[in-house]
Image: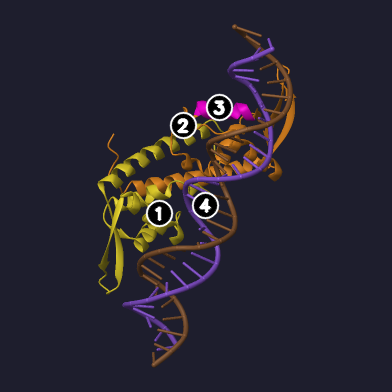
Chain colours: A orange, B yellow, C brown, D purple
Amino acid sequence: MKADKSLLSGSATLLVLSLLSGEDKYGYQMIAELEAKSDHTFSMKEGTLYPILHTLEKEGAVQSYEKAAPTGRTRKYYHITKKGLRLLDTKKEEWTTFSQAVNAVLAGTTPVMA
Amino acid sequence: MKADKSLLSGSATLLVLSLLSGEDKYGYQMIAELEAKSDHTFSMKEGTLYPILHTLEKEGAVQSYEKAAPTGRTRKYYHITKKGLRLLDTKKEEWTTFSQAVNAVLAGTTPVMA
DNA sequence: ATATTATACCTAGAAACCCGAGGTATGTCA
DNA sequence: TGACATACCTCGGGTTTCTAGGTATAATAT
């Protein structure tokens, strides 16, 4: 985590749901994609991701199923449900509101000198 | 807090430093200004703000002094130091990196339908 | 006069969130 | 066959914020 790790707070679930909205994915893959898509800003830890996935499954936001990889290994894929998609929409709007509010406060500050 | 409260995580210090970069302020005032500037998205609690101010003072990022209000009441004002301004710059850049990374991940998602 | 409300500061304990560090197991490659 | 990458998992602890209280003064209402 390059950025202050605590900045991740509260957005981990949003990021996971976002990743799953495109296609079903398995845990290890999500970590790699997050790292790539965020240009290495996010390195979500396994100790963070797996509990989130289990919680989402308990809530009915995702469903898991096992599937063999081409290599023969078994992977656990996660599929986002309709409920999960609604949750994603909610969390996206929360994120938008939140980030705009932060930017509004920062706008009253001396500009960042690059 | 309208937005998911956990989204506030990690940014509280940034917001406080940002408020103080304009002029010296006292605690109660900061809470009111945050609420106003963020259009009621942030309602920072006293139990959150005061410990943050005390920590920042211990770190030398702010300095406090007492001053009587026109009413006669004593208020505790906080002044941001050079060290605090440097911290603010750092945290602003972290915020920018972070929010851009979140947006990059969200960009790969089905758009939010308003 | 006096009760209530707003202002203004503070802290202790609990809750939420994430990470570090470990564990287990399988497939690949030297 | 030993090392490494893949792939899953959990427990304990640290950090951060909130809840819920406390104290005190000034203004306002009764």
Specify the amino acid type for callout 1: Ile
Labels 3 & 1 near each other (Cβ < 8 A): no
Of helix, strand and loop, which one carries label 3?
helix
Instruction: Quote the CA–CA distance across marks 4 and 1.
Output: 17 Å
Instruction: Quote the CA–CA distance across marks 3 and 1.
Output: 35 Å
Mark 2 or mark 3, earlier in chain: 3
Instruction: Quote the CA–CA distance across marks 2 and 4.
Output: 23 Å
Residue density around tag 2, few if under 14, some if 14–19, many if 20 or more, within 10 Å: many
Disc 4: which residue: B5
Of helix, strand and loop, which one carries label 1?
helix
Q: Which mark is residue A41?
A: 2
Labels 4 & 1 near each other (Cβ < 8 A): no
Instruction: Quote the CA–CA distance across marks 2 and 1.
Output: 26 Å
**Magenta-colored segment: predominant secondary structure:** helix
Q: Are marks 3 and 1 on the same chain?
A: no
What x and y, as percent, mark residue D8? Answer: 68, 31
- Looking at the rendering, the stretch of residues picked out in magenta corresponds to A27-37
Specify the amino acid type for callout 4: Lys
